[in-house]
Image: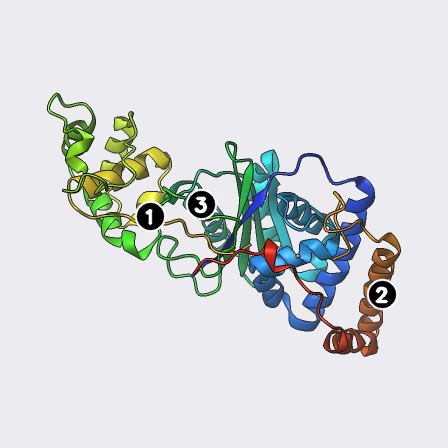
Amino acid sequence: MPKTGVANLPLHPGKAPRWLFKRMVALSKGITEVIIYEYGSDEFLQRLSDPFWFQAFSCVLGYDFHSSGTTTVTCGALKEAINPEEVGITFAGGKGNASRNTLSEIEAFGFQYNLSTDTIKRLQYCSRMAAKVDNTAIQDGHTLYHHVFIFSQNKKWAVIQQGMNNQTSYARRYHWLSEDVESFVCEPHNTIVGDHRQDRVLDMTAKQSTAAQKVSVDLVNDNPFHLQRDWAELILHDNQKTLDDWLSPCRNKPTVPHLDMPRNINWQKMKEIYDVHPTNYEELLSLKGVGPNTVRALALISDLIYGEKPSWEDPIRYTFAHGGKDKLPRPVDLPTYSTSIEMLEDAIKQAKLGDHEKLHALKRLRNVTPPIPVNPSILTSYD
C-alpha cells in the first residue's frame, strides 16, 4: 500500500539559521548521491518513505531530534541540493504556498524526463489523492500545510507531507510510497510513529470502514432527496431523538462514540456528485468539493441509520546526530560536520572516477562503529 508511516512532532518556533541550512544542503547532497550511486533511485525513495529513516536522516543533517522542522527544513534542503538531471529524481512542492506549485512542477519535470502525458497526469492524480486522504478521509485534527511529491524518471514516487493541529501545536507527518499501490482508501499505513494516540479520529481508510465506504457510495448515488431526509432526521427533524437514545442499556457507553454531525451540507454539490455517479469510494473521495464535512456526514449516516460503523481508531504508533539548531540533543559540532561533508563529496568524486575504495571504507566503518545508545524514555510504543 502507498502509505508507509505517520509521525507526530511538536511545533518549534523560529527558522533554521542560514549557517546550518547551507550545511544541511551540502551534507544532504553528499548522502543522497552516495545512496543513489550505490543502490539506485528506487532505494532512495524507499528510504525517504520510511519515517524512522527520515527522522534519523534529519538528525544527521543537524536538525532538532523531534521538532516539526525535521520535515519542512529537511525537504527544503533536499530540494535545493538535488539536481534532477544528474540523479534522476526531483522534488515538487514544499511548505505553504510552495505546495500549490506541486502539480505544475510535476508537469515541468515530467516533460524533462520525457514522460508521457498520461504518466504525468497519473503522477498529478497521486499527489492530489495523497493529500486528499490525509486531509479528508483521515480526520485527526491536523490540517496539511506542507506537501512534497518526489518522483523519478523511472515513474516511481513518494510523498512526504505534514499537517498542523493548532490546538495542540503538534504536527503530524505522513509518508507515502508508490510501490505496490492498489488503492488509496484501504489500509494505507504500514509503519506509524508519533508521540501520542488521539481519541475520536475518523479513519475511512481502515478495513473496518469498508462497509461504511460502500454505504457512503450508495447514499450519494441515490436520489439526493433521500440523503437530505436521512440527514434531517438526525439534525433538523422535530422528532429527532435525544443522545440518550444512542446510549447502551447501561447508559454509560455511547453506541456511536463520536457523534458530531456537521450542521451544514452543500446540497448543490451532492446533486453534482449524484450526476457523476461514482463507482467506488476512491472515485467519490477524488471528486472536487468532497471535503471533511461530506465524508463525516456520510460516515455517521452509515453508522446511525444503516448500522455500518466506520473506524474511530487513530492510525498512530511510536516516535534520534550532528546536534540540533536548538542545541537538542546537543549543539551542532561544526568541525565534525564540515569533515563529514568533505568526506562524502570526495568519496563520490573518486567513485565517479572509478576509485570506489572510499565508499567501501565508509561501509566497513558502519560495521565496526558501536551504536549510539538511545534513551528509551523518549520513545513510546503502541501495539
Residue 114 in view of the camera: no
The amino acid type, in three-letter code, at marker 2 is Met
178 or 14: which is nearer to us? Answer: 14
Callout 1: few (<14), some (14-19), or many (20+) C-alpha neighbours within 10 Å? many
Where residue 193 appears, as percent x and y from the top left, is: 52, 55
| Residue plotted at (59% across, 52% down) | 111
The residue to which callout 3 is attached is 134
Q: Is residue 119 left or right of residue 82?
A: left
Where residue 53 appears, as percent x and y from the top left, is: 61, 61
The amino acid type, in three-letter code, at marker 1 is Met
| Residue plotted at (76% across, 52% down) | 323
Where residue 164 appears, as percent x and y from the top left, is: 53, 38
| Residue plotted at (53% across, 49% down) | 195
Where residue 33 appears, as percent x and y from the top left, is: 73, 63
The residue to which callout 1 is attached is 204
Q: CA distance from mark 1 to mark 2?
A: 47 Å
**Placement of 144 over or under 351, stated as above or below:** above
The residue to which callout 2 is attached is 343
Q: Earlier in the sequence, mark 1 or mark 3?
A: 3
Q: Earlier in the sequence, mark 2 or mark 3?
A: 3
**Disc 1 secondary structure class:** loop
Quarter where residue 30 is shown: bottom right
**Disc 3 secondary structure class:** helix
The amino acid type, in three-letter code, at marker 3 is Asp
Quadrant of the drawing holding the N terminus: bottom left
**Disc 2 secondary structure class:** helix
Q: Is residue 44 left or right of residue 251?
A: right
65 or 26: which is nearer to us? Answer: 65
Q: CA distance from mark 1 to mark 3?
A: 10 Å
